[in-house]
Amino acid sequence: MAPQLAWIGLGNMGRGMCKNLVEKGDLDKPLIIFNRTTKRATDLQAKLSTGKSTVVEELGEAVAKADIIFTCLGDDQAITETLSTAVRGDVKGKLFVDCSTVHPDTTNKLVKTVEEHGAHFVACPVFGAPAMAEGGQLVCVLAGQKSLVEKVRPYCKGVIWTYSQGLPIDYKPNTHREMLIPRSSTSGRAEIDFSDQAPGKATHLKIIGNTFVLNMVETLSEGHALAEKSGLGSENLHNFIETMFPGPYTAYSGRLMGGDYYKRDEPLFGVDLARKDAKHALSLANACGVKMRDLEVADAHLADVQKVQGSKGDIAGIYGAVRQESGLKYEN
């Protein structure tokens, strides 16, 4: 008998992933959707194929009716509170699949909480921006008992992620496109398989991996500020970036040049979440005696972004902070 699936959490990433699970997941039963703010769930449902999803207003109802429960929440506190509430009911035999970006210690604690109540756990954090979530082009990191990972994989392959070569983008200057909008699906690897490894290994990789994104934006921001002030010009620098670093570097460079970093009503990668990830990475580094100087600089600039834009700030706002530091206006 086909399992009943539920989806919990409709943030920037969760909405696209949930949509693709409904539209591409070949589900035998309507996907159960729960979000703390019910309106966000009903708004999404209105855009989905009729009869393929059902919205519930209580977390307990979603969990009670489902066999496999996907979660995608913003931070450690949110997912911890959600799963602590979820296991109050009878969850024996159920499988929780968490796509949240959290500290690996948090993931390991969640595993213990779930297993103590007779349920199972697979970690499935993802790499990619909201546009990639929307297009089903995320990179999934699956970790946990192999037999459990195999139960989850059909809902990831071709749904949350599809084969793509080098994660190509369709970038057009000055159109303020989101990062990594897929152009085609060909061949390649879009899954990192940590089967039979502790679920915390997946979020461990996710936290370290996100430091690459933070450092990339810091490098681009400093480069563009220097290009402007020294007389090279941002367009000339962007031409170099397009040639040498196609992909995320080029996409983010375009976001900086177009002013997307301060014009958004809703951030692609919110400053609060970016600082949460930086904090987790620095915690991991401090625990084993590693210094991450680049990350410390990026985090300091993110703190400046918070001062200017509050929670509406985006990771790309690092550019505005670097501009201010360099004697330029925050907005380009």
Image (tube, rainbow, N blue to C red):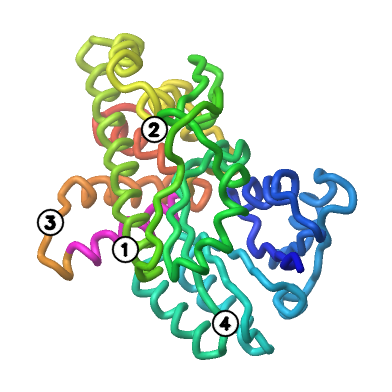
Q: CA distance from mark 1 to mark 4?
A: 27 Å
Which of labels 2 and 3 is toward the front? Answer: 3
Element under disc 1: helix
Q: Quadrant of the N terminus?
A: bottom right
Amino acid carrying mark 4 in the image = Ala
Locate the C terminus and report the quarter of the image it occupies.
Answer: top left
Left or right: residue 253 versus residue 281 is: right
Residue drawn at the location 31% of the way across and 13% of the way down: 243
| Sequence-earlier tag: 3 or 1 | 1
Label whose residue precedes the other's in the sequence (1 or 2): 1
Q: Residue 304: image x %, image y %?
A: 34, 47
Mark 4 or mark 3, whichever is nearer to me = 4
Please say whether residue 273 is one of the residues in the magenta stretch: yes
Residue type at mark 3: give it.
Answer: Lys
Q: Which residues are magenta?
A: 271-285
Find numbered disc 3 in the image and state the secondary structure of the residue it sits on: loop
Which numbered disc covers residue 280?
1
Residue 50 x, y percent position in the rendering: 89, 48
Q: Which residue is mark 2?
A: 330
Label 2 neighbour load within 10 Å: few <14, some 14-19, many 20+:
many
Camera-side residue of 107 and 149: 149
First in sequence, mark 4 or 3: give its number.
4
Horizontal arrangement in the rendering, residue 248 relative to residue 68 (left or right) = left
Label drawn at residue 79: none
Residue at 24% x, 66% y: name it: 283
Tell me which secondary structure the magenta stretch mostly adopts. Answer: helix
